[in-house]
Image (cartoon, rainbow, N blue to C red):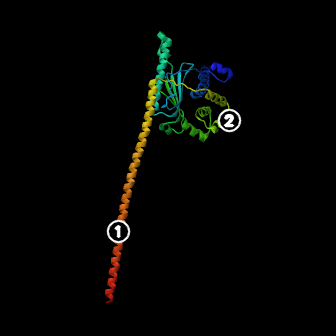
């Protein structure tokens, strides 16, 4: 049916054509961004398929999740999160381990009897967060955090797993104060901002981004589904983490309600004490008034006695 309609509507495209366009644009956009991030030239040779879709998961906090393979065989997973997950380190370590196992299986299958652990390449996990957890806000001037495993003795060996965390909310605060100063700032603005003024300022400073915006706009008009990449087990971990975060927020709300109730009780007790003190003051005032009356009466009696 689609082929027949294409005779009358040439703009209609097949699923294969759309996926091919996505693949080409992901390679172009991410390749340029990652080259800036890694401070070296990288080439994406493949956008890898996934085991299941996580973006369709109603409990997921992900906006985007893409896995790519570099020319040297390295895997790189790029996530964009609406809200940064709780336990970001532990969570990313689990996904990184999943990627590393995928690397191992691929190399073992390809090399067979000639396989050595040297054939297993590194894995990068890159996380961009629209709203980052509190721990990142302790470093208000830093918005690119790179982690790798190192020995405390200075001994060097490649343990294959590396991580980069980018809190976009902290980046936006910095760039609002000082403006876009370099290509990294430009890329983070492109990837993380939908404010018209910021986009216009970016295009004025880096007009080459206009082509990328055109690609994004074109894809958004044609694409209905974007596939995720990870296993069902890790999807469940994500769901549990989100549930944990919701439970934590509910606990905070409950604690705040308890504190408010306690404060109301304290205020009520204080008001009662204040009311008791006011009553005591009124009684004292009445006693004083009565004493004054008695003294006036006594004074008049004495004056009357003296006249006699």
Near-viewer residue (6 or 209): 6
- 170 to 161, vertically: above or below: below
In this rendering, the answer to whether 281 lies above or below 94 is below
Quadrant of the rendered image containing residue 32: top right
The answer to which quarter of the image holds residue 90 is top left
Q: Determine the CA span between mark 2 and mark 1.
A: 79 Å
Query: For this rendering, which residue is in front, 37 or 92?
Result: 92
Q: Which residue carries the number 2 mark? A: 204
Which residue is disc 1 drawn over?
A: 284
Q: Residue furthest top?
A: 113
Q: Residue 209: x percent and y percent? A: 65, 30
Query: In terms of secondary structure, where does tag 2 sit?
Result: helix
Which residue: 50% across, 16% down?
A: 106
The quadrant of the image that shows the C terminus is bottom left
Image position, residue 299 (x, y; %)? 34, 81
Residue at the (63%, 38%) spot, across then down: 196
Q: Can residue 112 be seen in this snapshot?
A: yes
Q: How many marks?
A: 2
Mark 1: few, some, or many residues within 10 Å (few <14, many ≥20)?
A: few
Is residue 152 at all visible to an observer of this figure? no
Q: Spot the residue most to the bottom.
A: 308
**Which of the 4 image quadrants contains residue 307?**
bottom left
Q: Nearer the viewer, mark 2 or mark 1?
A: 1
Q: How far across and down, in percent of the image, does residue 46 sit?
A: 57, 20
Q: Position of residue 183 (x, y in %)?
A: 62, 32
Q: Secondary structure at mark 1?
A: helix
Evaluate if marks 2 and 1 touch, with contact meaning CB atoms under 8 Å apart.
Answer: no
């Amino acid at each position: 049916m689609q082929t027949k309609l294409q005779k009358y509507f040439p703009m209609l495209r097949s699923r294969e054509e759309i996926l091919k366009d996505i693949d080409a644009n992901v390679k172009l956009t991410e390749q340029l961004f990652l080259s800036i991030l890694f401070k070296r030239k990288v080439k994406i040779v493949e956008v890898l398929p996934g085991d299941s879709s996580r973006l369709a998961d109603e409990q997921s906090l992900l906006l985007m999740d893409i896995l790519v393979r570099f020319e040297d065989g390295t895997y790189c997973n790029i996530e964009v999160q609406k809200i940064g997950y709780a336990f970001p380190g532990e969570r990313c370590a689990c996904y990184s381990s999943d990627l590393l196992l995928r690397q191992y299986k691929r190399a073992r299958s390809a090399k067979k009897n000639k396989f050595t652990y040297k054939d297993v390449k590194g894995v990068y996990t890159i996380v961009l967060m629209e709203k980052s957890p509190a721990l990142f806000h302790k470093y208000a001037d830093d918005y690119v955090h790179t982690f790798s495993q190192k020995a405390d003795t200075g001994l060097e060996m490649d343990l294959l797993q590396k991580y980069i965390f980018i809190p976009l909310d902290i980046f936006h605060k910095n760039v609002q104060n000082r403006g876009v100063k370099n290509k990294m700032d430009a890329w983070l603005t492109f990837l993380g901002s939908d404010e018209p003024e910021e986009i216009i300022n970016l295009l004025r400073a880096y007009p080459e981004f206009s082509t990328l915006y055109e690609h994004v706009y074109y894809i958004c008009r044609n694409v209905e589904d974007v596939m995720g990449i990870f296993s069902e087990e890790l999807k469940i971990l994500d769901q549990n983490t989100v549930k944990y975060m919701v439970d934590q927020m509910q606990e905070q709300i409950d604690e705040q309600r308890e504190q408010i109730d306690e404060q109301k009780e304290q205020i009520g007790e204080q008001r009662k004490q204040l009311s008791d003190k006011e009553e005591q003051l009124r009684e004292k005032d009445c006693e004083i008034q009565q004493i004054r009356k008695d003294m006036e009466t006594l004074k008049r009696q004495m004056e009357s006695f003296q006249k006699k």
